[in-house]
Amino acid sequence: MLHEILLSLSGQPSPLFGHTQRKDALVQDDLSLLAPPEKALLQSIAHLSRLHAQVRAHTSQISSVHRSVICRSVSTAIVTNHLGSFQKKILEVEKAILAEDSGYVGGYGIVPLSTIVGEFAPWTRRMEWLWEIAKFIQPEDRLQDPRYGCTGAALMDHLRTESQTGYLDIKEMAVQLATAAETAWMKQLSMWLLYGNLPMYGKNDFFIQEDFESEDDDTQFSMHLELLPKFVSAQTAGSILFIGKSLNHVRAKKKTSGGISTAPVTLYHEHIEQLAGLKSPISSTQLSTAVDWIRLSLSQSTLSKLLPLPRILEMLTLLHDFLLLGRGEFAVALVSHANSRIEENRRRGALARAQSGGLAGLLIKEGDVMTALAQAWAELFSLQKEEDPADEELELARELLRLSISDNKTVRPMTPSQSSTAIPEISRVSFEDILFPTPTSLTAQVRAPLDLFLSSSDIAVYSKIHSYLLGIRRAQIRLGDLWKRTSLRRNHPSPWGPPRSNSAFGQNKLREGRERDNTRTRQMRPIWATASACLFVLSEIGSFFQGEIVHESWQHLREWIEGSSLSTSSAPGSRPGTASSSKQQRQSRAASPDRICSRPSSKAGPPSMGRHDPEALTVAHRRHLSTLVHSLFLTDVSFTSVLRTLLTSVDRFVALVIRLETIQRNMDLETDEGVVDALVDYAQEEREVWQDLRSTRDDVNVGMNDLVASLRHIDDHRSGEGLGPATPFGMGQAWPGTRAEVSTGPGFRHYVPRQPAGVDRLLMKLDFGSLRGTTISPGVADLEFGRM
């Protein structure tokens, strides 16, 4: 029976134990030769034999079909090391029995069954643990389906957890399997860090993968946090993504153009030494140090030529001046020409409906949007003087910026996993259909190699901020244009003169004209009061956003990048900038990047790039963008909803006032000059417009009150939770991925976004305006509202 026991323990089928029976059952339970104690001992042998067979069969299947190379490596390590050790133990016991070792063989050549069971008793716990690991890698009921099973990252995290046990043998086994898993993972990571290539085998299990949904021609990569091991920090993962993307970009451009110089071969040897110094279990700090060393070394050798600092500043300045409305004349020109295209389409649509009775000409087409942008560029170029130097930024903006109709099906939300600094989720309230009735978006084309610095998600955030700020700016412009319609505000008719003015008919006409003008003036007083109040509220909010948040945050980021303290006296105010002010800023800082490049670097320690490190600049820009999103209240759904409703009411309010002016002008022609249109009843239209105008004016007043109430709620909420005015991660919290122990040079400091002024300043201005009588309550205004 001994040879049957040893064969069954080796995984061979034996008539003594049945694998199809229930757990710990014997086939020959009715053997009269077996005593009850012997049967009890054989049950433990049967259990170990079945576990061995199951683990071997399961791991063999995992090594064949599992999609993860890491899981296959662990499965192979189980078979090779641990099951091999178990098989070696069986051979040792068999050899000792055949040699009649006194430790196993007693008197008269008898081998006690208890001795055999005692030799393999420790392996029962080990085999049970190996069976649990095998089932964790691939569930038993999903063994034939490669779509199911754990990922390599989940397995490494599980093995690290299992190593924290009170059993020394289990701990050693867990450490050995974790070493095998981390070795396979390091091979994948080395391919990416050294050559910028995704691993050839098991790339679907690597946390960096190709972004097939990207519309760019160049290969794009994205990071999947669910495939990232826990011992890799978010900051380290972002650096790993940046290094591989940079190497992949350099190799791709070298194949196409051959104009980019790569790093010397000895540099890769140094990188290999850094990775080879990582021993299992991999420490998060050691991995971060090695990755930072490789990143800074790569930045010092290759990326300093590929992504120079002036080029990065040029792109950031363009985004600030045009997408964030830093140049105010661009917003004015774009709104003006967009309104012109809408009016032209409306007139063309009215003519088409009159001729064919259809709806032709009502929809905004792609050509209309592109024409509006082209006309805006033409207007900006016409503002330049002949003696002024060429505006290179304007030329670059015309080349890179595109205004197009948004396609909600193709626009993807930003992916926080692509960066170590997650951008807060933006409210789903859309402002893209304010400039045109059809949703449009202004985007910038990010060309290589700037795609290493700016991602498509960053441009999407800039586009949303642009639509948001432009909607406020457009409402200001449209409300301000109402005061240019002089006939609505005052009327100075020329007197008739004798002999008509001396007659009774002439005097009655003059008296009727004065009464009509006085009635209209009284009726328009609450309209102008609401328009003035709304213009004040939107102007203060727009100035707060544009000056205190956008402009000051950009100046703070630029000072950090350039490393020089800009004098506050030369900084523009809160009003949007112009071409001349932007040109003066560019000329005053033209030599700053050169001065930074000429600074000597430290000779000791790891390579130092300081603020020239593109990956550090990328993280700083992400933090800056995250702060903008939070400080502009784009994350607050209630505020954006109220603002969107108010902007819609303002559009309708302005349109009704303009229509009222047209109707009253036609009525005056009909009454004074006898120009009669028999197809239109202007008196009835005027009554309908006044009714709609009263209702819309109430909506505007309610919208203003709700907007101020929403601002008070934001102020109370942030003050109550200790978040400060507009800090995305709190006053005392560190930014994600910030490591105080990592430094990239002497005097280097991580970028900390500027903390803008609190909402209380904006509320003080709005309250001061209401004390001065700028705003009125709906109840008071209704008392002054004249009735038709």
Image: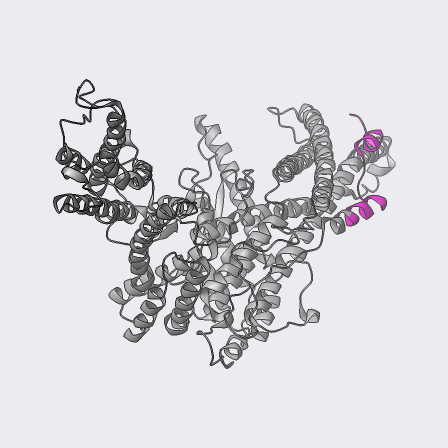
Name of the residue lying farthest toward the top: 30
The type of colouring in the image is one colour
Residue 136 position within the rendered picture, expressed as x and y whole percent measured from the top left: 33, 37
- x, y percent for residue 31: 17, 20
**359 and 348: which is toward the camera:** 359
Report the predominant secondary structure element of the magenta stretch.
helix
- Badge count: 0
Splitting the image into 4 quarters, where does residue 155 fall? top left
Q: Is residue 756 above or below residue 599?
A: above
Residue at the image position 56 percent from the left and 38 percent from the top: 429
Q: Which quadrant of the view contains residue 406?
A: top left
Residue range (magenta): 764-788
Q: Choose between 719 and 349: the one closer to the eye.
A: 719
Q: Judge left or right: residue 408 versus residue 130.
A: right
694 on left or right of 229: right
User: Does 263 sit left or right of 105 as displayed?
Assistant: right
x, y percent for residue 181: 31, 51
Measured along the vertical axis of the image, is residue 473 above or below residue 660?
Answer: below
**In the rendered view of the protein, which quadrant contains the N terminus?**
top left
Most distant residue in the front direction: 107
Q: Is residue 458 visible?
A: yes
Image quadrant of residue 133? top left
Question: Where is 540 relative to 34, above or below?
Answer: below
- Report the side of 687 relative to 45 (left or right): right
Q: Is residue 187 magenta?
A: no
| Relative depth, front residue between 623 and 517 | 623
Q: Which residue is drawn at the image coordinates 71% and 28% (left, top)?
A: 695
Location of residue 579 in the rendering, given as x and y in whole percent from the top left corner: 58, 64
Please say whether residue 262 is visible from this viewpoint.
no
Quadrant occupied by the C terminus: top right
